[in-house]
Image: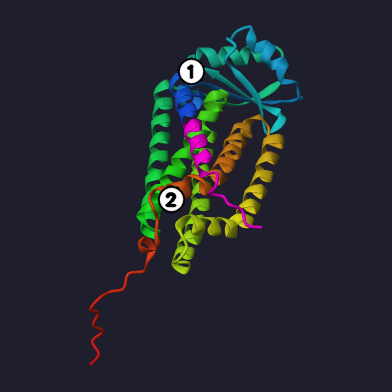
Amino acid sequence: MRIDFMRPRKIASVLSVALIVISILSLTFRGLDLGLDFTGGTLIEIKLTESTDLENIRQVLSSELEDDFQVSYFGSDQDVLIKIPGGSENNLSDSIVSSLKKVFDFDLRRKDFIGPQIGEELRDQGGLGLLAALLVMMVYIMFRFQFKFAIGALAALVHDILIVLGFFSIFYIGFNLTVLAALLAVIGYSLNDTIVVSDRIRENFRKKRKEDNISIINRSLNQMLGRTLITSLTTLLVLFALLILGGDFIQNFAIALICGVIVGTYSAIYVLCNNLILMKLNFEDLAIKKRENFDDGRP
């Protein structure tokens, strides 16, 4: 059975534009729930001698702190990570440790303070890292395939990043360095799908010269359907396992990757291919140019 992927391409375009607009509006007016890595604050890691419910720790901390602190398990149910926005390096962390010592028996593993200036630097460097990754990917595809493929791939990558960021903004999910790392992984995953689809489209354009571009793109997508579905489903199985069993510390990382894999698979089909159709990709764009007046030096 052959699926006509390009038949609903106009609906897919409207859907993509709507998701991007919603994401941009949410990022503009609501923003992201930036973690301590970007805003600065106090980070305390303790090792309890006996496991306890996190709610008990929250009750002790709520007497001294506002409601914006975070408490989560870090590995086992005896390793606890406490994140407190703002504060000062000495006063706040010492006060928290003293309060906890009155109720719980534990070993202090780590007590760090991240200043606002360091947080801003991490945020700026992370943004520059994303931009650099996008530009390098575009240059690679432009030389590896053709300029129209590079534009389509860049559109797909920007589409994926904006929607993942919009998802985190709309649902106000914590955004930290692990999520930033997940975004870089999403770029790599999306690019992998884009390259595989682009390579098959290029091959079919050179083989099926008499077919129109929509037919060739449909043929290419049907040929890659099995591979794309298997790759996406196996990746999602692992990510859902991380989401369910990985604990609070890795939860947002898994959410970002799950969202990125789903959106990346969609964009490799509709965002990339829609752009190729809009730019009127044809055989002449992909024809292998022969060198004229070549002299091999033989008589």
The residue stretch that appears in magenta: 1-20
Point out residue 40 in the picture as x, y percentages from the top left corner: 47, 22
Q: Is 177 on the left or on the right of 249, as rendered?
A: left
Is residue 12 rendered magenta in the image?
yes
Q: Is 101 on the left or on the right of 157, as rendered?
A: right
Circle 1 packing at 10 Å, graded few (<14), some (14-19), many (20+), is: some
Is 298 located above or below residue 122 in the figure?
below
* Nearer the observer, 77 or 147: 147
Q: Quadrant of the C terminus?
A: bottom left
Q: Quadrant of the N terminus?
A: bottom right
* Nearer the observer, 230 or 78: 230
* Residue positioned 56% across, 50% down in the render: 5
Residue 288, quarter of picture:
bottom left
Q: Which mark is residue 89?
A: 1
Point out residue 217 in the picture as x, y percentages from the top left corner: 50, 56
Residue 296, quarter of picture:
bottom left
Secondary structure under tag 1 reads loop
> Magenta stretch mostly in which secondary structure?
helix
* Residue positioned 55% across, 29% down in the render: 167
Q: Earlier in the sequence, mark 1 or mark 2?
A: 1
- List the residue tagged with mark 2: 277
Q: How many marks?
A: 2
Amino acid under disc 2: Ile
Q: Which mark is in front, 1 or 2?
A: 2
Is residue 83 rendered magenta in the image?
no
Point out residue 282 in the picture as x, y percentages from the top left corner: 39, 59
Is 207 located above or below residue 9 in the figure?
below
Q: Which mark is residue 286?
A: none
